[in-house]
């Protein structure tokens, strides 16, 4: 059983012992959850993720894939094992009362937050109420623990050359989060707004040589690559750490101080250019 699975099962059992109840209206804890919010919080706990918005059964699959889970079956019987996550849906992609999700705690037992028992229960998969759900569509996702050796060799790792803007405060580690012998090398807090190149992706963790390690994928915002040399012609525009208006942006100066200077532009996002040598963002209109 993987470390991730152990942590998820622990989260569910702990909440079960606390007597949490089922609610679709009050699904964000700490005293009540629904099936998908409970699964999301268990995943966040296991992966050490900061909880932001809560997913539902229609978005759970893509979230699992972003964490490194693989879909192992789609409406086909399989040999279950602890850690498998099953999603049932009467209609594909439709969340709510016609969908459900559960975590396998062994090859024949599941744990889930459910309406029938008004809370979290661990029970046999052969329970008639569970077996009924297999009349609906179902998919199953499985997570495979990654070793340090696999990461270093790049086995099954996606090799990419993609540029993103750093956003938020996330840890930078020598190895992906799930590696027990990882070391923290810093955070992204002081690199906000920088555009960096991602060269490797493994599940929800991406590698940047510039940052010097592996970072949660949520720290990166897509940008459009450009290669321009433009002259600042207009003052009165701010020079910012991120595109103006982006959460956490800071103004460091005005373009009045840059008039007449030709700057190298290597990315853009919306109406803003990224000045490569300054690692700052300027409104496009300053160059017109």
Image (cartoon, grey):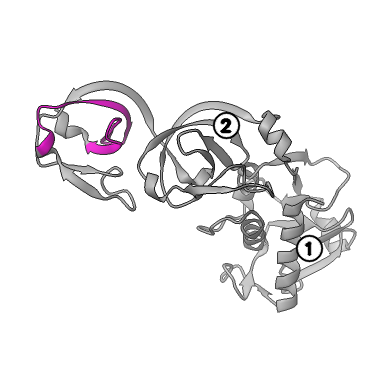
At a point 49% along the width and 51% down the height, the residue shown is: 170
Figure quadrant of residue 282:
top left
Q: Residues within 10 Å of mark 1 (few under 14, many from 20)?
A: many
Q: Can see residue 113? A: no
Query: Above or below — where is 22 with respect to 235?
Result: below
Asked whether 264 falls inside the magenta stretch, the response is: yes
Which image quadrant is residue 66 in? top right
Question: What residue did someone put label 1 on?
Answer: 111
204 part of magenta stretch:
no
Place residue 254 in its image quadrant: top left
Label ID, residue 200: 2
Image coords of residue 172 (percent x, y): 52, 46
Residue 89 point in image, percent of width and height: 70, 51
Q: Which residue is at the front of the view, 100 or 200? A: 200
Location of residue 115 in the rendering, given as x and y in whole percent from the top left corner:
71, 69
Residue 258's x, y, as percent? 13, 34
């Amino acid at each position: 059983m993987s470390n991730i699975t152990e942590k998820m099962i622990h989260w569910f059992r702990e909440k079960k012992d606390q007597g949490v109840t089922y609610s679709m209206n009050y699904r964000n804890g700490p005293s009540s959850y629904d099936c998908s919010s409970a699964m999301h919080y268990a995943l966040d706990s296991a992966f050490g993720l900061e909880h932001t918005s809560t997913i539902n059964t229609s978005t759970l699959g893509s979230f699992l894939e972003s964490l490194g889970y693989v879909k192992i079956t789609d409406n086909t019987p399989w040999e279950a094992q602890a850690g498998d996550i099953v999603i049932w849906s009467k209609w594909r992609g439709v969340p709510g009362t016609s969908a459900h999700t559960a975590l396998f705690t062994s090859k024949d037992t599941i744990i889930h937050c459910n309406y029938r028992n008004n809370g979290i229960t661990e029970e046999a998969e052969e329970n008639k109420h569970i077996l009924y759900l297999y009349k609906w569509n179902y998919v199953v996702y499985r997570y495979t623990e990654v070793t340090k050796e696999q990461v270093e060799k790049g086995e099954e790792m996606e090799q990419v050359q993609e540029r993103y803007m750093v956003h938020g405060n996330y840890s930078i580690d020598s190895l992906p989060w799930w590696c027990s012998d990882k070391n923290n090398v810093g955070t992204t807090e002081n690199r906000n707004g920088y555009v960096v190149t991602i060269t490797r992706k493994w599940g929800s963790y991406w590698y940047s040589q510039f940052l010097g390690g592996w970072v949660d994928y949520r720290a990166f915002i897509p940008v459009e690559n450009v290669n321009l040399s433009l002259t600042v012609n207009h003052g009165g525009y701010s020079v910012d750490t991120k595109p103006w208006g982006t959460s956490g942006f800071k103004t460091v100066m005005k373009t009045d101080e840059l008039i007449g200077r030709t700057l190298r532009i290597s990315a853009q996002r919306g109406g803003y250019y990224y000045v490569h040598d300054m690692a700052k963002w300027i409104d496009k209109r300053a160059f017109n």
